[in-house]
Image: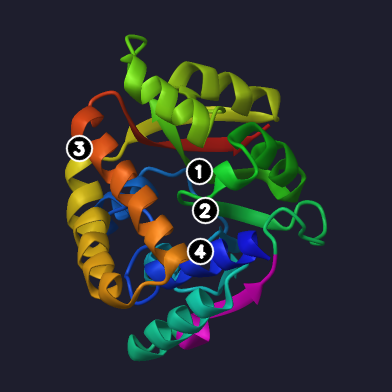
Amino acid sequence: MEQDQYINALIELHCEMERQGPGDEVFSKHILSLLPELPEKPRIVDLGCGSGAGTLVLAETFNTTITAVDFSGPFLVELENRAKAKGMDHLVQILECDMGNLDWPAGSVDLLWSEGAAYNLTFAGALKYWRPLMAPGGIAVVSEITWFTDDIPEPVFEYWQNAYPEIASENENAKRAEAAGFKVLDVHRLSSSAWWTNYYDPLIERMNTLRPSADTIMQDVIKETEEEIEMFRNYDDIYGYSFYLLKGV
């Protein structure tokens, strides 16, 4: 029960925010501009979509239906509202479920987008699970928390060993992608400024809003989030998000 309460508090903290993780609209559009040609009406999914920052970029770019998947109902409600406000609700199909438990037929996805969510299954686990869903020559864009150097200071190494021991370098993640049946087309790093402008700065405001009435569990979530933010403030040159552009082989 306490774990459920923790997850609910984490969801509440990230509600009413444009993003539930680091990202940037201009950066995402640039990534999409680099992709190989897709079918005229590509079948596109956004896995771990949150409140849909990426979903709406995909819908705007391709003008076709985007299947947006997340386990959190509150985030999907926010996505529905944002899509309606932008006149794009007819292009968004939401699906509230576990992105690691999809019953879709093999070869049913032309473009798979997953921003800051694969770690829930581990990067290797997510790619292995999602690979059969890809159509022949299908493209996947998956971001993953990544080491940017081999010279990792002890404090940040210990932090990530506790938080996500699967964190790896771009070369190691490329090998994982290849082992899962993908060809790595390119890798692009999200700038540290995008973390602050589009995620951490709004998140700090959100924490300050919730703090006065926060119960014990929310206080714990806020404390852990502040530790995460301070770690990135000190070591943003050591780690960050890399976007892996992959093609099914």
Mark pair 3, 4: CA separation: 26 Å
Q: Earlier in the sequence, mark 2 or mark 4?
A: 4
Regarding mark 2 in the picture, which secondary structure is present there?
Answer: strand
Q: Residues within 10 Å of mark 2 (few under 14, many from 20)?
A: many
Q: Examine the rendered structure and indicate whether residue 27 appears above or below residue 248.
A: below
Which residue sits at x=57%, y=52%? 112
Q: Answer with left or right where residue 134 lies relative to residue 11.
A: right
What amino acid is found at the position of numbered circle 3 in the picture?
Answer: Arg
Tell me the CA gap for discs 3 and 1: 24 Å
Q: Is residue 195 above or below residue 79?
A: above
Q: Is residue 95 magenta?
A: yes
- Tags 1 and 2 in contact by the CB under 8 Å rule? yes
Nearer to the camera, 108 or 45: 45
Q: CA distance from mark 1 to mark 2?
A: 6 Å
Q: Nearer the observer, disc 2 or disc 3?
A: 3
Q: Which residue is mark 1?
A: 142
Q: Earlier in the sequence, mark 1 or mark 4?
A: 4
Q: Considering the numbered disc 4 on the image, is that residue within a helix, a strand or a loop?
A: loop
Between 2 and 118, the one lying in front of the other is 2
Task: Provide the residue designation for mark 3.
Answer: 233
| Quarter of the image where the C terminus is located | top right
Q: Residue furthest top?
A: 151
Quadrant of image for the N terminus: bottom right
- How much space separates mark 2 and mark 3, taking CA atoms? 27 Å
Residue under pointer 4: 49
Q: Which residues are magenta?
A: 89-97
Q: Residues within 10 Å of mark 1 (few under 14, many from 20)?
A: many
Q: Is mark 3 in CB contact (under 8 Å) with mark 4?
A: no
Residue at image mark 2: 113
| Of the pair 158 and 117, the residue shown nearer to us | 158
